[in-house]
Amino acid sequence: MDIEDVPPSRQCKKVVGHQQAQQLFLDAFNADKLHHAWLITGPRGVGKASLAFAMARFLLHNPPASDDGPGLFGDVLEPVKAESLSTDPESPVNHRITAGSHPDLITIERSVDEKTGKKRNEILINDVRRLQGFYSTTSGEGGWRIAIVDSADELNRNAANALLKILEEPPSNSVLFVLAHAPGRLLPTIRSRCRQLRLKPLEFEEVHQVVGTQFPSLSPEELQGCALLSEGSPGYAITLAEQKGLELYGQILSLMSQLPALNVPALHALADDLAGAKNKDRFGLFSDLLTRFFNRLVRVNADPASDVPEILSGELEMMRSLGQRLPLDQWVELWEKGSHILARTDAVNLDRKQVVLNIFSMISQSLRA
């Protein structure tokens, strides 16, 4: 499931968290040792794109120092060290970035297939070749030329090799931000040519702040539930708030609490809600929430003293009860089988409603046995 930031990352006015990563970047800038390529890694939705755009905004407000010699009276002024990435949100530069019209900032992402009108599944070589044209020209405003690749996980082989060629011969006064959810899958030569910034999940209070700002109408219980269930990913917490994910998670818990009996009307109502071509994102959210349910159930029962926070009332008690009715290794096996089926659903065009019914039936039969 794709996590969509709200607002889009290029419109994000302030980065919450990731202070260490911000400071590492500022230290390099202040020391005039800014690397030409930065690999920003971390879980989905943790804020990689928001940080990349914040750094791009900062650089476009702070052009490379010109070598014009001493000042009017022969003095050489020491550059003022930057203490934060903050920029004036109402500046002309920021307005152009937000509108996507700044001539010195380009974003490389999955392009739209003209035949289907939908985004492609991967970034193609022609998408990356746009960088070659972008970097071959001089800066439109006399400063940095900045590109953001979002994300490198989606590069196909040819596109990855094209990106590598750019990294091998970086143009002057250029910076490339490469985002990756799973950097271990990238070409080792791409990783070696970038300075890496590893982003960790945010603290509960930080996610709480992000979601509360974007969704002030959420009740305190909904806000807390989304923040906890996101496990440190503000992008995922926003998705939960947008798509009523907490309500969907509650439906999953309700059905699980009645097992091995199947609440057939409720199960069919849920399956109908997830079926159909228009409900792909909803089904993706269900798949992820069900996977998180298994993850939490195993964690709760593997260590009775675990500090897994309760999302909804009665959740942990129900999980402990289920954990006593099946050995933990069987729950892990069910988790793996369920995840495999969910992952294959759209890949091989399985009937979503039948998939939902089959998964709950499979768990019910295991409990009965």
Image: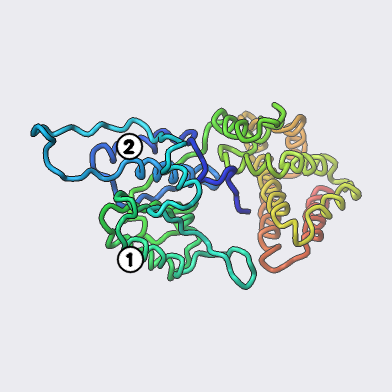
Residue 26's disc is 2
Asked if residue 87 lies left or right of residue 333, the reply is left
Cα–Cα span, label 1 and label 2: 27 Å
Quarter holding residue 93: top left
Name the amino acid type tagged 2: Leu
Examine the rendered structure and indicate whether residue 76 appears above or below residue 267.
Answer: above
Which residue is painted at 69% across and 26% down in the image? Answer: 220
* Mark 1 or mark 2, earlier in chain: 2
Examine the rendered structure and indicate whether residue 48 appears above or below residue 191.
Answer: above
- Give percent across and percent down for residue 304: 65, 31
Which residue is painted at 90% across and 50% down in the image? Answer: 264
Within 10 Å of the Cα at label 2, are there few (<14), some (14-19), or many (20+) other Cα atoms?
A: many
- Give percent across and percent down for residue 26: 32, 37
Within 10 Å of the Cα at label 1, are there few (<14), some (14-19), or many (20+) other Cα atoms?
A: few
Asked if residue 124 lies left or right of residue 315, the reply is left
SS class, disc 2: helix
- Farthest bottom residue in view: 115
Which residue is painted at 36% across and 65% down in the image? Answer: 132
Is residue 274 visible in the rendered image? The answer is yes
SS class, disc 1: helix
Quarter holding residue 68: top left
Q: Say which residue label 1 marks.
A: 165
